[in-house]
Image: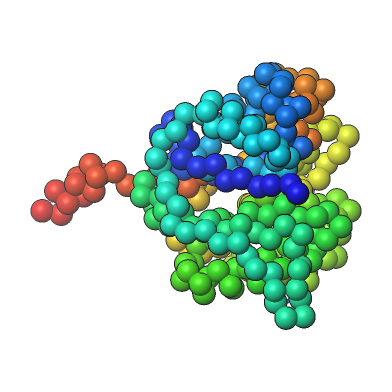
Amino acid sequence: MWRLLLLCALFVPHSLGLRICSFNVQSFGESKRDKPAVMNVVRKIISRCDITLLMEIKDSSNTVIRLLMAQLNRKNLVSVKGTYQYKDLQPGDEDAFSREPYVVWFQAPSTEVKEFVIVPQHTTPEAAVREIDELYDVYLDVKQKWNSENFIFMGDLNAGCSYVPKKSWKNIRLRNHTEFVWLIGDNNDTTVKSSTNCAYDRIVVVGEKLVSSIVPGSANVFDFMVAYGLTEEQALEVSDHFPIEVRLKESKRPTSRRRKYLKRK
Ligand SMILES: *[C@@H]1O[C@H](CO)[C@@H](O)[C@H](O)[C@H]1NC(C)=O
Ligand SMILES: *[C@@H]1O[C@H](CO)[C@@H](O)[C@H](O)[C@H]1NC(C)=O
């Protein structure tokens, strides 16, 4: 079975805030491990982020991730408060997901929002409408369990082209409840091939504190093909998806707080 991985707390230049990324690294396994040029691009992509969701890890030997981790530079920007595999046993609606979300609660002392939950998801294309809708149930479940308000849903939701027809959106609770903010739009393209144009990969946020701590304009589809000067063929060796990302504002520095205090005096 394909696996998901959340890598966290990696090196990042600091003034940018906390950058959170999601990347479907199409069939990430031994064959890619043995291509240094590919590993180099994957490493560079992940190094830009503080938290990264990796999807489609197909690595029974467990060597790819070990190698990747060894190559990455670690730094403690966030810590894990809790983890939870969604049980997917709702009466009448059992087994809605083919990959039950592995939910992670993060603590982030250096950002404005001090804690948030990430619900990663890689949907099955043909079941995308049902699975995206079902994320709303995951939201209600985890919100109650952890008493947290701030949620980031992200991953390859297959939320575009033929898998989610336009008319389906109004029946998807994660979309028709207006408190959810979709940061990657329906017309954005998260596919590498120039012949396709689909917004498969998405980031959706909810929670007043979290929403207000998003760096304006920071939600992005990271075109690593252009950024690293690759041909389409070279880029497709890395993945058929571009990563997506968003940044969270840093908390105000103690110095500025002090300045405020002195002014008041
Ligand atoms: C949102 O979608 C749900 C699930 O399909 C549906 O039951 C509900 O009526 C929809 N709400 C609105 C306001 O369209
Ligand atoms: C989505 O597409 C619009 C219109 O092309 C563009 O302005 C915006 O920057 C894109 N957003 C992302 C997250 O790539």
Q: Say which quarter of the image contains residue 101.
A: bottom right
Q: In this view, does 137 lie above or below 23?
A: below
At horizontal 51% and vertical 72% (from top left) the residue drawn is 145
Q: Is residue 204 above or below residue 220?
A: below
What's the coloring here?
rainbow
Q: Is residue 58 visible?
A: yes
- Depth check: give the residue in front, 226 or 265: 226
Residue most extreme to the front? 61
Residue 131 lies left or right of residue 101; in this view the side is: right
Residue most extreme to the left? 265
**Residue 79: percent from left, percent from top:** 42, 49
Q: Is residue 110 above or below residue 240?
A: below
Q: Say which quarter of the image contains residue 256.
A: top left
- Depth check: give the residue in front, 180 or 117: 117
Q: Is residue 243 visible?
A: no
At horizontal 52% and vertical 28% (from top left) the residue drawn is 70
